[in-house]
Amino acid sequence: MYHNILAESLCFSRHPHRKDDWLWYSMGKLYYLDWASDNEVKVGQAFKTSGTRSEGERDKIWLWHKRLGHASFGYLKKLFPSLFSSLDVSSFQCDTCELAKSHRVSFILSSNKSLVPFSLVHSDVWGPAKIATPAGARWFVTFINDCTRMTWVSLLKTKGEVSSRFQQFYQMVETQFHAKIQVLRSENGREFLNHDLNQFLQHHGIIHQRSCPYTPQQNGVAERKNRHLLEVVCASLFGANMPRHFWAVVSASYLINRIPYSILNFQTPLQTLHHHIQTPLIPNLEPRIFGCVVFVHLHDHQ
Ligand SMILES: [Zn+2]
């Protein structure tokens, strides 16, 4: 246990039994950090830069904006209202977001959603990407639970894998959530007219609703989700200066499942799923900025 000692705007801590150890902390400002190496407390090396409480909050808002895949500042205010006590959403503008979202196409957003989790699942396939992932994937398929807007993404090497991925998703929903998929809503692409998939849907009594040709808007939930995913991917890659083959679409889906939506009364999809259904333990790691430096700990036997 360290004793905190405050002196004007400085803060430092001292261990009661280790008189030679001093730790210096910042108080919303930047200080020179010094570990005293002998019994003398080296306070003379502490420097202070100018800063205010709102600047600290502004820094935190930017940190979370980047950690959550460049989430909108309006939604960040819903998640962290205390950080915006003295700051206005309109005072934040992100160049990376402008770049990533410049191709946005709007779709009519339906305000209706089903009340039973997994009764209706939206799906869409995106690709082929010009640059494949290191594992050779060029497409991805999304499965979106209409009730909670939880999204699952699966990377594909060929479009023909859609059928097997849906069957795996169906089994996962049944085993983990004790729920049945009743309706699959998709675009009218050939990958969804697959004989194997149709057999599976018929066998399990699932209704397949397909959009009319050349009217992707009828599959609006999945189309919008794809746009959102790709915006987060672009912003993550631009922000980290990383090459396009990293894709980042799986981490993007992890993040957007943890961002509030207006259609969910500003709850996140994960919170809404927890609200509706007994869920297994879903990993909920604190996000880090995409592309940041990490270190892998190897055990002695590795
Ligand atoms: Zn941004």
Image: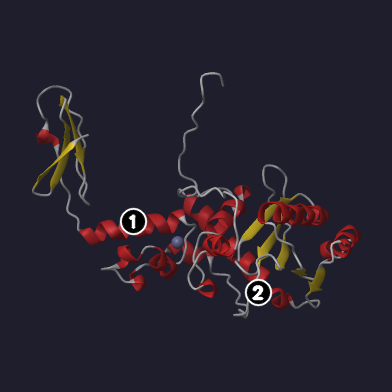
Tell me the kind of residue under disc 1.
Lys
Percent x, y of residue 177: 66, 56
Could you tell whether 237 is left or right of 146 in the image? left
Q: Is residue 170 above or below residue 107?
A: above
Q: Residue at 43% across / 63% down in the picture?
A: 95
Q: Against 178, is 182 above or below?
A: below
Whether residue 149 sits left or right of residue 48 in the image: it is right
Mark 1: secondary structure: helix
- The disc placed on residue 60 is 1
Query: Are there few (<14), some (14-19), or many (20+) residues within 10 Å of tag 1?
Result: some
Which image quadrant for residue 193? bottom right
The one nearer the camera, 3 or 96, is 3
Instruction: Point out the frontmost of discs 1 and 2.
Output: 2
Coordinates of residue 279 in the picture (x, y in percent)? 59, 55
How far across and how far down the image is residue 300, in percent? 51, 19
The residue wearing badge 2 is 114
Task: Please state which amino acid type lies under the numbered disc 2.
Answer: Ser
Cβ of mark 1 under 8 Å from ligand 1: the answer is no
Q: Left of 54 or right of it: where is 174?
A: right
Horizontal and vertical percent position of residue 172: 71, 52
Q: Is residue 129 visible?
A: no
> Residue at coordinates 48% horizontally, 64% vertically from top-left?
97
Front residue of this view, candidates 30 and 218: 218
Label 1, label 2: how far apart the Cα atoms are: 36 Å
Quarter that holds the C terminus = top right
Q: Dot 2, crowdedness within 10 Å: few (<14), some or many (≥20)?
A: few
- Residue 212 is left or right of residue 25, and the answer is right
